[in-house]
Image (cartoon, rainbow, N blue to C red):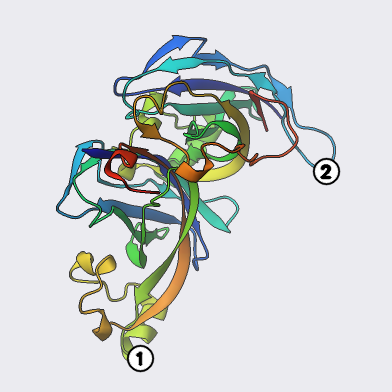
Amino acid sequence: MSQSSVFLLMVGGQIESAEGLDEGLTQVTKKSRDDRQQFVWNFPLDITFKTTNPFGWPQLIVHAYGIDAFGTDVVRGYGVTHVPITPGRHKIRIPMFVPESSSQLQKLTAWILGRRPEYVDVRVLAQGEGREVTRVRSQGFLTVSFNVVMKDMKKLGYDVIPSEMSTSVIPESVGPNSGGTTET
Amino acid sequence: MAEVHIVGQIVGASGFPDHSLFCKWGINTGGAWKALAGLREGQTQVDTPQQHDAAYWAHPIDIHYATKGLQGWPKIHFQVWHQDSFGRNELYGYGFCHVPTTPGMHEIECPTWRPSGSFKEQVSQYFLGGGPQLKNPDLIYSGADRYRLHTIAMGSVHVRLGVILRNFDKYGIEC
């Protein structure tokens, strides 16, 4: 089974993208042949945002596609997470989910024709509204590691770390990976 | 005025008898707090997980509050509902937790409880589903009049919240 994934970094409010690509498409990869059964993309993300207001903090939206038994591209999962708000290294395991067909008959026709339910616009996942009418099936996880650097948050009066820690080294919260990559 | 940004997501829930779940959530604050931007309540999608040990919603939360006082710090409350294969909804649990008061990323596990009825109601609940619900959902996050309630423990909701504070040190608040 091979998969590729598309990602998009979405922001709201007054945040705008300053430099770097905020959308992209990874390579197509196959599952590893050992017990771990992992897909590895190792895809770099390098982007800068600027804002005066943290509302609409960037969210990473990922959708993974794969080839089914009939050779068509089908959605294997959607996932969304906020970019962490503290500077430093973070490793986040995003649960992935697939929209479910409304009935058994639709499920069967979707499986035969290869046209599974998908989101028309993936940006809806980053908003809180409108999700209550969707039914999904969660399957699998995607791991992202973020290295977050901030500039002038304190100058504008924003605290993202507790005050007694501001002069000490920020502890690492993650494992032994290199920075700024996407992997599963 | 001091400001608080709550940026995060309701990741999912685990520990329930069945994991075909959705969650209604809301954030409640005291009188001195004013929501400047963002949705204060919502409902997640219904998740029927393939691996049945946890439900995952990944529901984003992004709220901006301004406040004149510390009293009534934001509380996030949840109602976890179960949807079975026939499309019927039954209540699985209520829970709440305070939004953390220190800036930074926090992983919170919020335990939930469900009102338990009389013995007859429990038997009927076992066979037919359903069960008692609170008439006034304010009781989820308030302490008044709780002594009359009999409840049973259910699973927990997992939330990942990032808290950004602004101007709190200008008012002498240490957090």
* Residue plotted at (30% across, 36% down): B167
Q: Nearer the viewer, residue B119 or A81?
A: A81
Would you name the residue on which mark 1 appears?
B119
Q: Decide: few, some or many residues near mark 2? Use Cα within 10 Å; few <14, some 14-19, many ≥20.
A: few
Residue B112 picture quarter: bottom left
Q: Are marks 1 and 2 in contact (CB under 8 Å)?
A: no
From the top left corner, tell me how far across and down residue A173 is, in percent. 63, 42
Task: Identify which amino acid the numbered label 1 is placed on.
Answer: Phe
Q: Are marks 1 and 2 on the same chain?
A: no
Instruction: Give the residue displayed 36% in from the left and 64% down from the top.
Output: B95
Side (left or right) of B71 relative to A61: left
Alpha carbon separation for disc pair 1 and 2: 48 Å
* In-front residue for pair A175/B95: A175
Residue pushed farthest bottom?
A: B119
Q: Which residue is mark 2?
A: A35
Q: Nearer the viewer, residue A107 or A27?
A: A27
**In which quadrant of the rendered view does residue A25 lie?**
top right
Q: Nearer the viewer, residue B41 or A165?
A: A165
